[in-house]
Amino acid sequence: MKRTLTPVRLALGGLALLVVAALVLWLAPSDSYLLLPDTARRVSPLVHVPKNRAKGDDKGELFFLAVLVRKANLLERIIPAVRDDGATLVPAAALRPPGVSESAQRKIDEHDMSQSQSLAAAVALKQLGYKVLEHRNGAEIAEVVPGTPAVGKLKPSDVIVSVDGRPVQGPTELRGLIRRHEPGELVRLGVRDSKGLRTVELRTKDESGQPVIGVIIDQSANIKLPFPVKIQAGSVVGPSAGLAFALEIMEKLGRNVDRGYKVAATGELQLDGSVLPIGGVEQKTIEAKRSHVDILLVPAGDNAAEARKFAGSMRVIPVKSFQQALRKLATVPPKS
């Protein structure tokens, strides 16, 4: 006996196939990742100074912001509508340089978080007039730019200590020595890593008439504080909480930084107090808004412009340095 394929049966069969296909795509991982809003975290419980130096806190709160990162499945990669609110799809290359594994990148991010804590303490204590001993000892590579001469020869966490035999104490010296070359010329770099010193030779690349090697760099330094400052960030990694940590240290030591408001801050802090751009601005702005933050501090420029797109009524304050962040917060009338 033959069964007739009626339109209803055909429709049900087609629907079943769609459900199965969607399920397969949902379970199958892709080679892309999703950036998602996390939960804004209070900084106060994470920062500790000696009891004999701690001051009373005010009614405000400081928050730092993080981004959740997870692999997208094939369905999420293909159909934007199934992604969570605030999700951004990015390729793996946007999260780690070519040739760097997930575990290796995790170690780099953990190092960046540790360094951001030391820098935050140094910057905040110097601002308060304490004597902080600093020894700059090279230019640390934060990121290798794809498609540049540095790919395959340098990696994040490497520290450049010399160029053509001339010592490099930090980013300023490195840039100056590289610019002595013409684009396409060979440079010889002294590089320090966990295994010791090595020499790396590469040719500079022409970028708008300037010689570049293709790295984003930070200051490498040994820092000695006048008293211990402990920061416990838990499982959160990366350098973007430096600005928030420094502000909270000021609060712990008696400076009313937040003026009684809920203030979130994101930005990579340098030893001289400058604030560098960070990633995941859309997600961080969304999580700050969801946490009913009053004021959001972000690096000036593209980061601030992006934050304003998602901030709603939340006030966005762009800053180029820690010192500027303090000045701008000081102009905000205290919350009654």
Image (cartoon, rainbow, N blue to C red):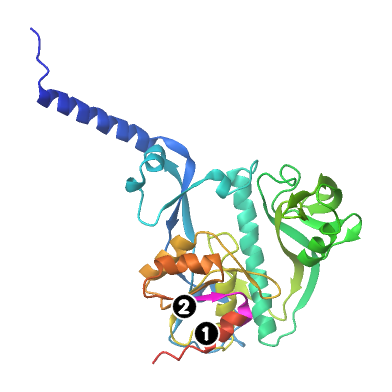
Using a 10 Å C-alpha cutoff, classify the residue at mark 2 as few (fewer than 14 neighbours), some (14 to 19) or many (20 or more): many
Camera-side residue of 131 and 92: 92
Cα separation, mark 1 vs mark 2, equals: 10 Å
Q: Which disc is residue 329 wearing?
A: 1
Query: Which quarter shows the C terminus?
Result: bottom left
Question: Which corner quadrant holds the N terminus?
Answer: top left
Residue drawn at 37 percent across, 75 percent down: 313
Q: Nearer the viewer, mark 1 or mark 2?
A: 1
Q: At which x and y percent is residue 196? A: 83, 51
Dot 1 surroundings within 10 Å: few (below 14), some, or many (20 or more)? some
Element marked by disc 1: helix
Name the residue located 67 percent from the left edge and 44 percent from the top edge.
Answer: 147
Rendered location of residue 109, percent (x, y): 61, 56
User: Reading the chain from its start, which is encountered first: label 1 or label 2?
Assistant: 2
Q: Which residue is mark 2?
A: 263
**Residue 319 at x, y percent in the picture:** 57, 75
Q: To which quarter of the image does residue 244 belong?
A: bottom right
Stretch of the chain drawn in magenta: 316-323
Q: Residue at 90%, 60% (x, y): give it.
A: 166
Q: Secondary structure at mark 2?
A: strand
Q: Is residue 321 magenta?
A: yes
Whether residue 320 is visible to the viewer of this picture, yes or no, is: yes
Q: Which three-letter amino acid code belongs to the residue tagged 1?
A: Leu
Place of residue 155 in the rendered image (x, y in percent of width and height, measured from the top left): 71, 49
Is residue 326 part of the magenta span, yes or no? no
User: Can residue 228 be spotted in the picture?
Assistant: no
- Judged from this view, the residue extending furthest toward the left is 1
Amino acid under disc 2: Val
